[in-house]
Amino acid sequence: MCAAAVVIELETLEVRETSLCFGEAAFPYVPGLLAFREVPILTEALARLASDVEVLVCDGYGIAHPRRFGLACHVGVVTGLPSFGVAKTPFTAGFVEPEAGRGSWSPLSEEGEVLGRALRTQNEVKPVFVSVGHRIGLDQACELTLALSPRYRIPEAVRQADIASRRALRLPR
DNA sequence: GCGACAG
DNA sequence: ATCTTGTCGC
C-alpha cells in the first residue's frame, strides 16, 4: 500500500509538500475497522512531513462511525493535531438529501445523535460526508471543506493525496 | 438470522 | 477499494 500526506496552502490551494510511505497491509479491510489498516502507515507518512501542519483532512469518517471513532479520530489523537474526516460515500449514519446548491447540507445522524453533515461541495453533485475527528468543531470542519473544494467535489487535500498515491502505485487515475 | 457498511 | 457501461458538459 501507499500512504500519501499532502500539505495544501489554504490561501492558494497549492501543494506545498508531498510525503509518500510504502508498505504491506498488516490488517484486512473490515468496515468499521479501517483505521487499524490505514493509520499506522498514514502516521509514518505524516511523521516524514517537514512542513508545519495546522489541521488534518482525512479520507474517511471521524465520529460519524458505528463506534463513534473513525479513522480521522485515530489520526488526530495519534498526532495530537486537529483533524476531521471527509468521506465519499454513506456509511452507517442516515441523512436526508441536502438541497442541490453548493454549501447546502443536512445532518448525519444515528440513534438520535447528530454526528456530522452531508455537505454539497458542488452544485448538482453528490454530497461528501463530514465529521469531526479531534480538536475541531463541525462548523469549522465544514467551512474548511468548502474552502478546499472551490472546483471539485473532493477537498483539495484529500484529492491531491489520492492523486499522488495512485500515481506512485501506477494505479488508474 | 439477514442485510449493510468508510477505504 | 476495483471494475464496467453509459451519459453529460466544458
Image (cartoon, coloured by chain):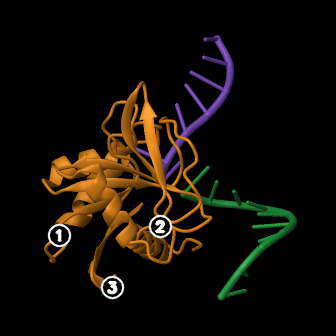
Chain colours: A orange, B purple, C green
Check the residue under mark 1 and report the chain it is in: A
Residue visible at 37% across and 72% down in the picture: A148
Q: Is residue A27 shown left or right of residue A134?
A: right
Residue visible at 16% across and 77% down in the picture: A51
Element under label 1? loop
Element under label 3? loop
Query: With respect to residue C6, does A150 lie above or below?
Result: below
- Which of the pair A156/A23 is nearer the observer? A156
Q: Which residue is mark 1?
A: A53
Q: Nearer the viewer, mark 1 or mark 2?
A: 2
Q: Is residue A54 visible?
A: yes
Q: Amino acid at mark 3?
A: Glu
Q: Is residue A94 shown left or right of residue A5?
A: right
Q: Amino acid at mark 1?
A: Val
Q: Amino acid at mark 2?
A: Ile
Query: With respect to residue A165, does A95 lie above or below?
Result: above
The location of residue A123, given as percent across then percent down, is: 57, 68
Dots 1 and 3: beta carbons under 8 Å? no
The location of residue A168, given as percent across then percent down, is: 44, 75
